[in-house]
Image (cartoon, rainbow, N blue to C red):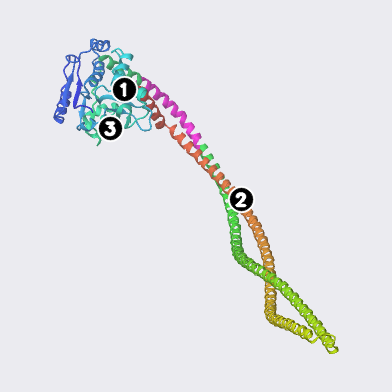
Amino acid sequence: MIPKIIHYCWFGTSKIPDEYLANIEEWKAMLPDWEIKEWSESNFIDTTGYFTKAILNGNWANASNYSRLKVIEEYGGIYLDTDVKLIKSPDHLLQYRCFLGFEEGGAESRLFWVNNAVFGAERQHPFLHRCINELLTAFDGSEPANESSPKLVTAVLKKYYGLEKYGTQLLADGIRLFSSEYFYPIPWYLAKNSKEFERFVFPDTVTVHLWGRSWYSREMMLDMIDELQSWSHNASREIHLLHETVSGKENENIQLQRDIIQLQDKIGEHLAFSNKNLAEKAAEISSLNLLLDKKDEGLQSKDAEIAFIKSNFDELNKQKDHYQQEHSLVKELNNQKEGQVNELILQLKTLDNVKILLSELFEKYSFSSTEIEKQFQQLRHQFEQFSGLLSQLQQGNVSLHLFLGQLLEDKKRSSELIQTLLDEVKQITSNGEQMNKYYSVLQQQYENLSGEHKIKFELLSDLLEFQKNSTRQMERNLHLMNKMVVSKSEQNTGLANEIKVLKLTMQDFEMEIGHKNQEIENLKKSVNWYHNTYERRSLIGVVKEKMKVYFRKTKQ
């Protein structure tokens, strides 16, 4: 932060003029809490060759240029030239590490100068060290004062801090630069108006440099007078040349006016021709717009057809989904029927087993009948034996006792055999009745199963046929739908190509119109160039340019 110290320098044997003392008293009154410090030969001690030579040769301004840098580097604070009028307190500038101001320049100009008649910095700021080194390297204390002051600090800012343009800005090392209205609102070439400094004050103005030029030596004044006399002589000669030039330029102006009139006539003819072409192009564009409108109507109808096709396509998709659902249902029923068929097959296998069992029963029944027949044959044989014995008894060939014993034995065996036969007949009769009942039930079940199997088989056949017909119909519908989509896609492609061709044609028309407009703009620029050239070749324009060149050379 910058300390509250105001530094000023006064070297030489002459006293400080009253007007400068008045400025210093105003500083003290406005800044009662600041330290105001004067530097002169009595308190500024330096043994460098530069300062010693400046003092010995009476170059007080150069001594001040060197000493102001040294004291701010050592103590910090704000330096003011004695011909500086303080307008407001600089308290708000203490926040910066270093600040300076432009004495002249402009936003559009590459020529500018930074002055150090008013500047401030904190102690040991690197900018001050660089300025001192550059000063001691380039000068020896005998140079013109402005070389080691504004030109020096401007060169250092450009070399080390990249300064390139005029205006308030912040550079490296915290260096804040302010535009000219802050410290130097009166330009140096208007120094004669310094007594009316109030009319140059801006709202941001902190100080006004009054350009006292107390450092001007007699030699510098004589050099300035010589320069002014030389400039006056050169100006008189240039004025004479200007008079001669003006007389020649008047003739050129007359010819230029004629050329302008001819050019205007040509431009008028060209504009008329261009307007005619534009009218023709406008008519072509109008007809093209009508054609585009018709194409738009066709596109709208095609959009409607496309929407209709899309709706049909959606409907076909719905039918396709419906057919797929029916196909899934048929497939599910088919699976169910296949299960039922498998069940029927199992039942048929069961019937075959029953048939086999019945065959076995019939065989057994047949075997039992054969056994009974054999037993009857035995009974018949026994009866024949009995009849033979009876005949022998009657004939007396067999004893009665033997006959009766044999008879009782035969009777017993016959009774047993008859009872056995009766039991077997009874059992066979019972088994036959049960078998007849079971066979009747099985026969009825077989007939029922055969009827159900027939119905189920017929239903399954019908479902399979329906599935085949539905699949074929769905495939035909999908094929037709794909053909419709391909046809409409080809129609849309043709329409898109027609629209593309029409758009390219419109672009060609627009480019041609753009070329015509560019030709018109070029002609207008040619007219403006003639006007500008004519104005610059006038006497006022020539004098303006000469004055600008002169002041630029004088300042450099």
The CA distance from mark 2 to mark 1 is 65 Å
The label shown at residue 418 is none
Q: Quadrant of residue 128?
A: top left
Rendered view: 411 above or below 453: below
Percent across and percent down for residue 186 are: 27, 30
Q: Are marks 3 and 2 in contact (CB under 8 Å)?
A: no
Residue 384 in the figure: left or right of residue 10: right
Residue 284 in the figure: left or right of residue 224: right
Residue 125 in the figure: left or right of residue 38: right
Image quarter hosting the N terminus: top left
Where is mark 3, residue-wise?
Answer: 181
Residue 13 in the figure: left or right of residue 420: left
The label shown at residue 153 is 1
The label shown at residue 505 is 2
Rendered view: 328 above or below 532: below
Q: Amino acid at mark 3?
A: Glu
Residue 234 falls inside the magenta stretch: yes
N-terminal label among 1 and 3: 1
Disc 1 crowd, CA 10 A, few/some/many (<14, 14-19, 20+): many
Q: Secondary structure at mark 1?
A: helix
Q: Which range of residues does the magenta coloring cover?
A: 232-257
Rendered view: 227 above or below 104: above
Q: In this orientation, which residue lies closer to the viewer: 344 or 207?
A: 344
Rendered view: 195 above or below 307: above
Q: Secondary structure at mark 3?
A: helix
Q: Amino acid at mark 2?
A: Thr
N-terminal label among 3 and 2: 3
Q: Nearer the viewer, mark 3 or mark 2?
A: 2
Q: Amino acid at mark 1?
A: Val
Residue 522 falls inside the magenta stretch: no
Q: Main secondary structure of the magenta part?
A: helix
